[in-house]
Image (cartoon, coloured by chain):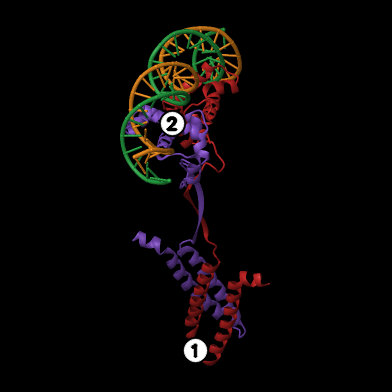
Chain colours: A purple, B red, C orange, D green
Amino acid sequence: MTAFLKKYKSILVYGFSLAALMFLLRFLELKVFIMDYSVEIYVGLIALIFTGLGIWLAAKLTRPKIKTVVEEKLVYIDRTGEFVQNDIEIQKLNISKRELEVLELIAQGLSNQEIASKLFLSLSTIKTHSSSLFEKLDVKRRTQAIEKAKTLRIIP
Amino acid sequence: MTAFLKKYKSILVYGFSLAALMFLLRFLELKVFIMDYSVEIYVGLIALIFTGLGIWLAAKLTRPKIKTVVEEKLVYIDRTGEFVQNDIEIQKLNISKRELEVLELIAQGLSNQEIASKLFLSLSTIKTHSSSLFEKLDVKRRTQAIEKAKTLRIIP
DNA sequence: GTTGAAATCATACCAAAGTATGAGCCGGAA
DNA sequence: TTCCGGCTCATACTTTGGTATGATTTCAAC
């Protein structure tokens, strides 16, 4: 019951206000404003009062309009979107499939031995591949190879 | 002028509605509802109409509350864009200035000796730095360090 | 069927990278 | 002042990386 009162308090107040105003107007009509021209003023007054009441009611009853503003917060994610391999450069440098494979694993931080195990090859094979790779890339170390291959977009 | 019209359109509509009703009421008063008991109905009617009008006005005029919603937007960064260093991660891993410096040079493909020469330090100092660096990054090799440091955005 | 490039593996050797340990120096915090 | 962390360097050692050379195989092209 209290919940009902709480919820419809606004409406009750409106109702009582209306009733009270009725009585007031009736009273005024009888006592003071018994004039012909008073009708316009009368109506205007009521209109104003009830317009105000309506506004008040609306403010009370309608849930507030919410305008949602989306604020974008950038979250930086692990590097590149899609990687497009620079096949032209690979061909130009004459890098073979195996060499490219080895290069990628080198860039992932694997040791020669680990690469050999992963590809089921001997250590010396990997060394041969990496050596020729360095020559083709014109570098001295695997770290340089990584740098160069990444800038040339040969690897991601 | 058109802007003014646009802005206060609601108010103008209200004004005209009020005027129109006045005339209507005056007309009705004269022609139809010339009765004593009509006052209450009369007033009630006006009250209702203008309450509605007030509500409508309120709905039109209240400016929406602005609710800000933070929306996380994932951004994939490629290494060609500008680089923002992840200082938080650097601090978290407790990497010192010198170590960071050495890390950058390692990632550029320099050998320990070259780094030593560039920074006017001894080879053993570079080895010490790189060793502690690998420990902090939890990696075994310099190539792994490069990989990890890049994904953590510690280096470009 | 010869040729040549790619791929495989081996052995040997040297260079560089990485580990372990210890020690001296310095500047700021307790 | 003392203490600690960062920076420096050294020595000794092990592991990994890289070069050089040579050999075998495969497979496609000429």
In this picture, residue A97 sits left or right of residue D11:
left
Disc 1 versus disc 2: distance between alpha carbons?
Answer: 109 Å
Check the image and report above or below for B122 versus B35: above
**Chain assignment, label 1:** B
Count of picture labels:
2
Expressed as whole percent of the image width and height from the top left, the position of residue A110 reads: 40, 31
**Chain assignment, label 2:** A
Question: Which residue corresponds to the image point at 55% horizontal and 86% vertical from the top-left?
Answer: B24
Question: Which residue corresponds to the image point at 54% horizontal and 31% vertical from the top-left?
Answer: B108
> SS at mark 2?
helix
A74 or A30, nearer to the observer: A74
Tell me the residue that label 1 is attached to.
B35
Tell me the residue that label 2 is attached to.
A130
> SS at mark 1?
loop
Question: Which residue corresponds to the image point at 54% horizontal and 20% vertical from the top-left?
Answer: B113
Kindly identify the amino acid type of the residue bearing the numbered disc 1: Met
In what quadrant of the picture does the N terminus of chain A appear? bottom left
Can residue A32 be spotted in the picture? no
Expressed as whole percent of the image width and height from the top left, the position of residue C16 reads: 49, 22
